[in-house]
Image (tube, grey):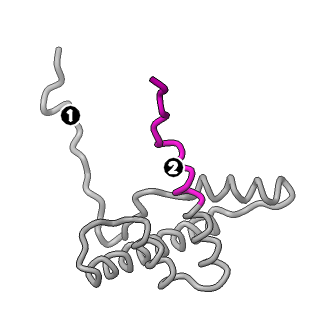
Amino acid sequence: MPPTDADKKKKRRKDPSQGTEPRFSQGTYLTKIHKAHHGNTMTISQAAVKELDRVVEHIIETLTHASGEVLAYSKSQTLNEKVIKSAASAVLTGALKRRALERAEASVKSFRAASAKPVVAA
């Protein structure tokens, strides 16, 4: 027998005054990185993971906003590698900027190598 309307539970909406959690949490990834770097000698608290997650979310939002500004300035509608590099250079500073640009370049190279079609000899 199918459930009736009385049997179905109503979904509750979240109270907007409680704030919103990030849509995608980096917490699991951050704890794995921490464990790989420090091993079992040091632990990280849930509060620290939440704060790091907020920092990562803020950096992503800032980069997204800067990318939009670069696109508007260049009067282009295509988000590409050059726009992301320009936004990262504008937002990040020092060693973080260098490291981010190095990792981005390496990621783009590996993606292009993986997506390149093999040449078939005829």
Image vertical order of residue 29 relative to residue 54, above or below: above
Cα separation between marks 2 and 1: 47 Å
Q: In this view, does 53 lie above or below 70?
A: above
Quadrant in the rendering for residue 24: bottom left
Q: What residue type is labelled 2?
A: Phe
Residue 40 vertical position relative to residue 86 in the rendered view, above or below: above
Q: What element carries label 1?
A: loop
What x and y, as percent, mark residue 71? 30, 76
Question: Farthest residue toward the right?
Answer: 41
Mark 2 / mark 1, whichever is N-terminal: 1
- The residue lying toward the viewer, choosing from 66 and 83, is 83
In magenta stretch: residue 107: yes
Q: Between residue 53 and residue 14, name the one nearer to us.
A: 53
Magenta-highlighted residues? 106-122
Say whether residue 100 is left or right of residue 21: right
Q: Quick check: 60 above or below 46?
A: below
Which mark identifies residue 8?
Answer: 1
Image quarter in which the N terminus is found: top left
Where residue 26 sits in the image (x, y, percent)? 54, 58
Quarter of the picture containing the C terminus is top left
The circle on residue 111 is 2
Q: How many marks?
A: 2
Q: Give the secondary structure at mark 2.
A: helix
Q: Residue placed at 76% from the left, 53% from the top? A: 36
Q: What amino acid is at disc 1?
A: Lys
Q: Residue furthest front?
A: 122
Q: Residues within 10 Å of mark 2 (few under 14, many from 20)?
A: few
The answer to the question of whether label 2 and label 1 lie on touching residues, with beta carbons closer than 8 A, is no
x 63%, y 76%: residue: 98
Residue 18 badge: none
